[in-house]
Image (cartoon, coloured by chain):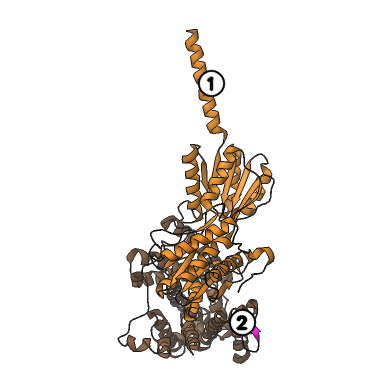
Amino acid sequence: MQITKKKHLAVAAALMVAASSSFAFTPAVVYDQAGKFDKSFNEAAYTGAERFKKATGVAYREAQIANEAQKEQVLRNLARKNVDLVIAVGFSFTQAVQTVAAEFPKVKFAIVDDVAKGDNVQSVIFKEQEGSYLVGMAATLASKSKKVGFIGGMDVPLIRAFGCGYTQGAKAADAKVEVVSNMTGTTPQAFNDPARGGELARSQFDRGVDVVFHAAGGTGMGVLQAAKDKNKLGIGVDSNQNHLFPGFVLTSMLKRVDNAVYQLMLDGQKGTWKSGVVTMGLKEGGVDWALDANNRKLISKDIETKVNQAKKDIISGKVKVVDYRAGNSCPVK
Amino acid sequence: MDMIFSVLDATLRVSTPLVLAALAGLFSERSGVVDLALEGKMLAAAFAAACVAYIAQSPWVGLGAGIAAGMAVAMLHGVVSITYNGNQLISGVAINMMVSGVTPVLALAWFQQGGRTPTLSDEARFTAIDLPFADAIAHSPALKTFFGHNILVYLALLLIFVVSWVVYKSRFGLRLRAVGENPHAADAAGISVKGVRYMAQAIGGALCGVAGAYLVLAQTGAFIQDMTAGKGYLALAALIFGKWRPWSAVLGCLIFAFTDAIQIRLQGVELPLIGSIPDAFIQALPYVLTVVLLAGFMGRAVAPKAIGVPFVKSR
């Protein structure tokens, strides 16, 4: 009797330890209005969180905002419910994370794709120039006319960094290649004007361009559509856009939000999480180029070898891709 | 030489939605109702056209839905400004805000693609029409500029003639102008002021519907949040600088589209003698030129006298 009681106690204690260790760390992901299955950033974040769950067996919480005004409210709710690490996906959360992080100094916060201030905030940003370098190289190698195009959204340093990395990659593959570059506009509207994107792409095609890379959000949908209509090649951005027009999207420059979220959760669980800014490049698995069933036929063995070689060289430090934002200038034109 | 044709080609494509929206605004404003809601009507039409064309897999059904959506929003503007004598400016702005907010929410709820609608297949879009002599065209860039567009571009061209005939030569046109200039006189002559104004709204809504449908069915192939990107306001500006006349307004739209096409092609290009022009300056060019040309050569703009004034029948 005595023994069994002790046994029970031991089992209970063991259970409690197990329970407390699995409940000790609870991360949470917050998606924006676009929703969990948006085939873009949010879905990538979801994939990363699921991978973490599979690898560690630790469950995570998730929340989705229905409108702009709910951002702070949702973050606050999670912070109150004993969540240890709140991960917000997308730069639209910057202000909300800053505000709420200050209110809950004991909770860890993270934002992906922008920098938010705070002693308990980690900001994960990407080396867009490195991924752009790779797709620039692929563009040159796939171009028959040896003229490749770039279409940016709003004319800001971030978008110029895409263009600059792209140009560096294009020129690295063939120094004689001509890069035609356009910006859609100077206001945020420049990210939501697919008609104009299509028009810019057509103007570049008329000038002899046959591969065009867009870093223009919704405007880029028009770019890719125009490429399909004119039987040219487009290059997607941020998430894998190869599936939009199979056979007409050469590749996509990926921001690996899934890797960022996975890493954040893992660090949080292990206790290696640190506040501050983390920049993820090719080396850290933060950016990449997309190769899947949709563009397999467009990427020849030669292109694949050369782009992967460039990837290795950048990771090893043999090739350095200049970041436009560092000095507000680009070494190549 | 190819560049010139490329610019003319782009001018036609870009000006089409502007021309349609400007003509839509012409009806409304000539009847005495300020129409800031052009943007919202186009956006609603673009959204409806994208959804319906995707489901029905037919551009014509999509166009019909676009026209219906444009007219529905126009009727809303009509109820506020004509029936209830509300402030027309506020009604227009409110409609724009409402449509801009409602459309992505609906798209999100129905298609779960981040506020976008699914990309349309070629069967569900208006693509360039294949004419029997298409092969001959393919070798001549000059002809290609004017042929080889989608059907809505030609429809817009045709509509310019129709609209200018209706406004100046038809009985309805005379009543429309009378109601916009002096509604009380028109009323005394036995014309239903509200009836004519509602009719003008309906026609304007339908034209905006075609413009919005064009953005999705001809130009881009999917609806995206706020995809009209200020085209409604641009058309309104062209209408005002064009002194509320169809041909002058169309000219304004063409000048804008033309300079915009040039602007796109000038970005980052080294010009002989001048060198490279800063992008910001080049990007402002279409707006500056359109205003200068229209304001400078068209003379003073005189608005329809009764514009913005709700009609209250005197007893």
Q: Is residue A116 above or below residue B258?
A: above
How dense is the environment of label 2, judged by Cα within 10 Å: few (below 14), some, or many (20 and up)?
A: some
Residue A290 appears in the picture as rendered: yes
Front-most of A322 and B135? A322
How dense is the environment of label 1, judged by Cα within 10 Å: few (below 14), some, or many (20 and up)?
A: few
Residue B209 x/y as whole percent: 43, 73
* Start-end of magenta stretch: B269-275
Question: Residue at label 2?
Answer: B285
Q: Is residue B30 above or below residue A1?
A: below
* Magenta region includes residue B256: no
Q: Residue visible at 57% across and 45% down?
A: A264
- Between marks 2 and 1 in the image, the one whose residue lies nearer the viewer: 1
Front-most of B99 and A101? A101
* Cα distance between the residues tagged 2 and 1: 76 Å
The amino acid type of the residue labelled 2 equals: Leu
The amino acid type of the residue labelled 1 equals: Ala
Q: Residue visible at 52% across and 72% down?
A: A174
Question: Residue at label 1?
Answer: A13
Q: Residue furthest front?
A: A318
Q: Residue visible at 51% across and 75% down?
A: A200
Residue A113 x/y as whole percent: 59, 55
Residues at circles 2 and 1 in contact by the CB criterion of under 8 Å: no
Q: Chain A appears in which tint?
A: orange
Q: Chain of mark 1?
A: A
Q: Is residue A86 above or below residue A253?
A: above
